[in-house]
Amino acid sequence: DAGITQSPRHKVTETGTPVTLRCHQTENHRYMYWYRQDPGHGLRLIHYSYGVKDTDKGEVSDGYSVSRSKTEDFLLTLESATSSQTSVYFCAISGHGQGASNEQFFGPGTRLTVL
Amino acid sequence: DQQVKQNSPSLSVQEGRISILNCDYTNSMFDYFLWYKKYPAEGPTFLISISSIKDKNEDGRFTVFLNKSAKHLSLHIVPSQPGDSAVYFCAASTSGSARQLTFGSGTQLTVLP
């Protein structure tokens, strides 16, 4: 299995507070992604990164920001959490190099509850 | 507007029989398709994939079929085992898209002993 960890694994917070989720990889993969999973929606891409300091928006980026200052770390920040951001958040990584496939490898997830 | 659709939220199959999970897509630019399996409280794990230049890919008990003209793919599991009970997601991507994946909403497969 790819070396991906997410922290925290569970978090309960209150509306209006800032929250930062961390994804850490030991695989030296170029691409990193943040998804959220909600019932009836599958996994939806929030933001992704294609290198250090290189990030772009995904399908559901409103209310989220990301940063990648090192290859191994990708941070997702909710500047002011809302109840609609209650979800399970997954980080994923994907290989580098011309021959690499499009497979993504996922972390264990972070369950976030915004009260 | 969902570009990848899994119209069956759930499927129950008897152990030893075939499970067939279906997925439809609307974006003709998709050229790579994947299936993921997800157990509760875990991240999705990659199962099998297929490139648009093929119409079939096999890996042990798992076979993925791609029908480009119908924009349809299916995952066959033969024989089904109770440990296959999980949520299955299909996903699609286009070349040069930073390997972004678009996921379907998932199908809960239950294999009955």
Image: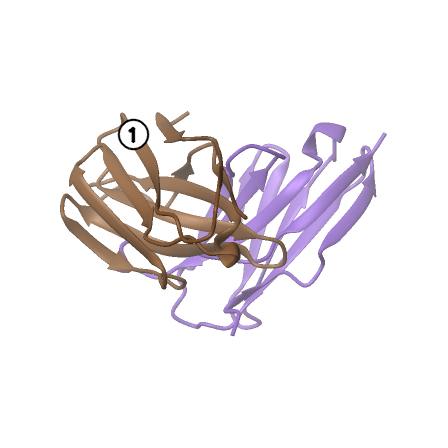
Chain colours: A brown, B purple
Residue A89 coordinates in the image, percent (x, y): 46, 44
- In this view, B45 is above or below B88: above
Residue A77 coordinates in the image, percent (x, y): 32, 47
Residue type of the residue flagged with mark 1: Gln
- In this view, B87 is above or below B93: above
The residue at the point 76 percent across, 43 percent down is B18
Tell me: A57 left or right of B3. Answer: left
The residue at the point 27 percent across, 55 percent down is B98
Can residue A75 be seen in the rendering of this structure? yes
Q: Nearer the viewer, residue A27 or A103?
A: A27
Residue A83 coordinates in the image, percent (x, y): 52, 55
Q: Chain of mark 1?
A: A
Tell me: B24 left or right of A85. Answer: right
Tell me: A29 left or right of A110. Answer: left
Q: Which residue is mark 1?
A: A25
The residue at the point 28 percent across, 54 percent down is A65
The residue at the point 66 percent across, 46 percent down is B76
Q: Nearer the viewer, residue B78 or B95?
A: B95
Residue A3 coordinates in the image, percent (x, y): 35, 25
Q: How many marks?
A: 1
Q: Nearer the viewer, residue B42 or B98?
A: B42
Q: Secondary structure at mark 1?
A: strand
Examine the image and state in which quarter residue A95 appears: top left
Image quadrant occupied by the C terminus of chain B: top right
Can residue B100 be seen in the rendering of this structure? no
Q: Residues within 10 Å of mark 1 (few under 14, many from 20)?
A: many
- In this view, B21 is above or below A1: below
Tell me: A78 left or right of B90. Answer: left
